[in-house]
């Protein structure tokens, strides 16, 4: 089993740079994801590894072999396409057998390997059916079997679950992980869905504008985002623009200018050495903030700010509060354990205290960009409608 | 009690709606049935009657005879039949070889170019058929453009005698029937999802194998339709062999025409030849169809079963 090395890979289409000087190593047997918004270059990167696109410059190495210029049919790499691309004129069996028939293997061997593969994806009783007579999930399984039968070194998956509905997607995700464990080869997974990437991957590379912004294990990217983009793109977060006031041995004191003359101090752990007066961005995950109508006991390692509840969104598993703090709006996820804090539900326009442990926020070495300030981050298109209806209901009670 | 009355009512209503549907489908198909009866069945019936009569000088004698069929089956007309089949076969094969790449190219070009190229294919239909054939005569003749150019380039020493040969017939046949091959092919190639070719290459097929294992099978319907649209009319070709060929190799269409044109007219002979031709074409069509359909219909059947 060989690792994949990508060195300074660049690709452009008609002057548009789709992939910009990307270098990384994917270990053998790893389940690696490229995650990013559409147009970030993740699919182009995958197509270059598959051999459908030839890069402008840079190298792709599979083990010690340079495969940059090899045509797709000479690479030990197979792909699962976004819409499966099963051959409509062939049965499930013939689709899976395709690669082996191209290789002109003896029929008995083809048969045993096809059956083995169909068994792996639990499709052995559907082998005589044609692709347009089976369901989306089944097509997905056939595509997996077809791609794995050649025993590739690397399996590429291009948004493989995008065409499935939510329940099936969650089911197939687990199935994919099981298959990955069973065959033990490298999987390279491309998706724009961060929850998919986080739940399935050993490592994730967050991409934007053709470059890798950050790569690492999912929890590392989530807890320790290196840039505003990764903090913003992975999960949900509050981005708070702030300025360094003082530097201590093990923490930094920040002043947050909330716009209308108000400011508050917050502590944070840090992963780089900031300077006094430097403008930075604090990333604060909504689920790490606690909300209460009584002021918590003052402690050195707890940050406390005061705000007013502006919106309440009941989401079943948790409630989302939008809390106005000065001119900032904080998003707060609160589990339904309000018995710990309050015996009565929080209400609209109610003054509340927000507090969080200083190790739960994360400092990003970037000034908050103007466009992303408050409005972009703190206003949500979809839940907004819902909040209105909930609000009306609540008040009429 | 109530139940059985209701079910009786339901069955009466159901029957009524079935009757209505039957009436409706008859009414809807009436115009085409009328058209087919008047312009196809009746004329063909007349042809069949005429083939069983005795020839006169201008008309026929109303006297039963199997003489015409006996003559056809004796093999006197083997050569024109053979020539016609050969011509139809060559025309079809050449049309496939020339038409497939063209259709593929059009189908894969951008939307803007697609329409432009399709119009180019259709434009020749706007000019009279006979005029187009005559222009080919001028183009190919010994003092024509082609020979002029070849002579000037020094590629030949004396003009090529293309006109009034079987080659000239095939050239013009291909020219005339090519659009009938390109258009059905274009319509099936355009529908192919080209990521299927990526998938084939990904699974180890080189360009050639991907074409034969994926593209070709997926376009077989268009290939079949185009072949029929070219082969059948080419079989009965009359005007092109008449204008481009020579009198030593007569095609079946020409023979039938001469039987009626030359005096004494032989209506029974012409009719018998037409009928044999029809039977042959029907036999070829049915064989090709059943061979082709056997493959496709199994799939169709399964799809229907599973829906």
Image (cartoon, coloured by chain):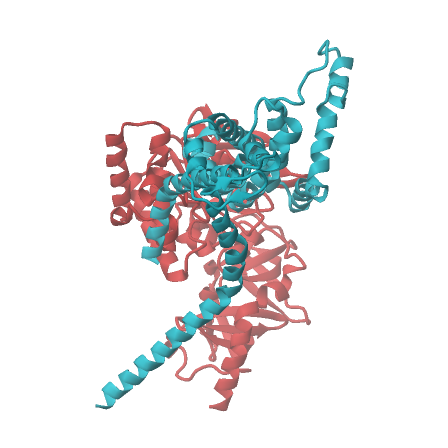
Across and down, in percent, residue A346 comes to: 47, 81
Q: Is residue A151 left or right of residue A49?
A: left
Task: In the rendered view, tell whether residue A269 sits above or below residue A389.
Answer: above
Q: Residue at x 48, y 61 (%)?
A: A358
User: Image quadrant for the C terminus of chain B?
Assistant: bottom left
Can residue B154 be seen in the rendering of this structure? yes
Q: Which chain is red?
A: A
Across and down, in percent, residue B79 comes to: 49, 25
Question: Total of numbered circles in the picture?
Answer: 0
User: Image quadrant for the N terminus of chain B?
Assistant: bottom left
Can residue B105 be seen in the rendering of this structure? no
Task: Return the residue found at the far left.
Answer: B1
| The quadrant where residue B170 appears | top right
Which one is in front, A70 or A112?
A: A112
Q: Is residue B124 left or right of residue B253?
A: right
Which one is in front, A102 or A396?
A: A102
Across and down, in percent, residue A79 comes to: 43, 40
Task: Return the residue found at the far top.
Answer: B157
Q: Which chain is cyan?
A: B
Task: In the rendered view, tell whether residue B25 sits above or below residue A310.
Answer: above
Q: Residue at x 70, y 42 (%)?
A: B123
Which one is in front, A119 or A332?
A: A119
Which one is in front, B6 or A23?
A: B6
């Amino acid at each position: 089993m060989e690792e994949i090395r990508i060195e300074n890979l660049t690709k452009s289409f008609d002057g548009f740079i789709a992939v910009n000087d990307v270098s990384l190593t994917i270990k053998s047997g790893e389940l690696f994801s490229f995650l990013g918004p559409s147009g970030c270059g993740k699919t182009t990167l995958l197509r270059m590894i598959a051999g459908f696109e030839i890069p402008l410059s840079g190298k792709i190495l599979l083990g010690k072999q340079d495969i940059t210029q090899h045509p797709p049919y000479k690479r030990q790499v197979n792909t699962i396409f976004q819409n499966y691309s099963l051959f409509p004129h062939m049965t499930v069996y013939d689709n899976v057998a395709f690669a082996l028939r191209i290789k002109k293997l003896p029929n008995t061997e083809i048969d045993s390997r096809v059956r083995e593969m169909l068994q792996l994806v639990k499709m052995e009783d559907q082998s005589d059916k044609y692709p347009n007579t089976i369901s989306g999930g089944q097509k997905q399984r056939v595509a997996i079997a077809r791609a794995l039968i050649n025993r590739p070194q690397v399996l590429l998956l291009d948004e493989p679950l995008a065409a499935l509905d939510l329940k099936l997607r969650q089911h197939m995700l687990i199935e994919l992980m099981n298959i990955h464990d069973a065959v033990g080869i490298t999987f390279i997974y491309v998706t724009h869905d961060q929850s998919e990437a986080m739940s399935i991957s050993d490592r994730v590379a967050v991409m934007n504008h053709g470059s890798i912004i950050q790569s690492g294990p999912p929890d590392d990217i989530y807890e320790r985002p290196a840039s505003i983009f990764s903090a913003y793109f992975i999960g949900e977060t509050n981005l708070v623009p702030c300025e360094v006031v003082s530097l201590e041995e093990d923490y930094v004191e920040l002043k947050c200018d909330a716009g209308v003359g108000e400011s508050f101090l917050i502590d944070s752990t840090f992963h780089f050495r900031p300077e006094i007066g430097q403008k930075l961005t604090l990333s604060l995950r909504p689920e790490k903030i606690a909300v209460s109508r009584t002021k918590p006991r003052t402690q050195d390692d707890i940050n406390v700010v005061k705000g007013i509840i502006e919106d309440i969104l009941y989401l079943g598993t948790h409630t989302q509060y939008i809390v106005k703090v000065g001119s900032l709006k904080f998003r707060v996820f609160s589990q339904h354990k309000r018995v710990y804090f309050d015996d009565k539900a929080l209400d609209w326009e109610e003054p509340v205290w927000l507090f969080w442990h200083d190790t739960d926020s994360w400092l990003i070495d970037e000034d908050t960009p103007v466009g992303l300030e408050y409005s972009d981050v703190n206003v949500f298109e979809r839940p907004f409608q819902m909040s209105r209806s909930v609000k009306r209901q609540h008040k009429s009670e | 009690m109530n139940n059985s009355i209701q079910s009786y009512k339901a069955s009466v209503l159901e029957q009524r709606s079935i009757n209505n549907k039957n009436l409706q489908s008859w009414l809807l198909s009436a115009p085409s049935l009328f058209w087919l009866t008047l312009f196809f069945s009746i004329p063909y019936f007349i042809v069949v009657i005429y083939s069983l009569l005795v020839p006169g000088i201008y008309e026929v004698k109303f006297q039963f005879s199997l003489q015409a069929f006996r003559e056809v089956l004796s093999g006197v007309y083997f050569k024109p039949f053979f020539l016609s089949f050969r011509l139809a076969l060559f025309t079809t094969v050449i049309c496939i070889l020339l038409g497939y790449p063209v259709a593929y190219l059009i189908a894969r070009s951008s939307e803007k170019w697609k329409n432009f190229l399709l119009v180019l294919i259709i434009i020749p239909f706007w000019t009279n058929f006979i005029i187009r054939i005559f222009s080919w005569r001028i183009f190919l003749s010994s003092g024509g453009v082609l020979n002029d150019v070849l002579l000037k380039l020094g590629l030949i020493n004396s003009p090529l005698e293309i006109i009034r040969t079987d080659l000239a017939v095939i050239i013009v046949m291909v020219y005339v029937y090519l659009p009938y091959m390109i258009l059905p092919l274009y319509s099936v190639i355009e529908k192919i999802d080209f990521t299927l070719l990526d998938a084939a290459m990904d699974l180890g097929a080189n360009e050639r194998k991907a074409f034969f294992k994926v593209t070709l099978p997926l376009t077989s319907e268009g290939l079949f339709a185009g072949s029929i649209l070219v082969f059948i009319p080419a079989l009965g070709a009359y005007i092109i062999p008449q204008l481009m060929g020579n009198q030593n190799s007569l095609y079946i269409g020409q023979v039938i025409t001469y039987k009626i044109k030359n005096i004494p007219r032989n209506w029974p002979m012409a009719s018998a030849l037409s009928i044999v031709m029809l039977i042959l074409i029907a036999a070829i069509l049915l064989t090709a169809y059943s061979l082709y359909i056997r493959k496709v219909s199994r799939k169709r059947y399964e799809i229907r079963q599973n829906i």
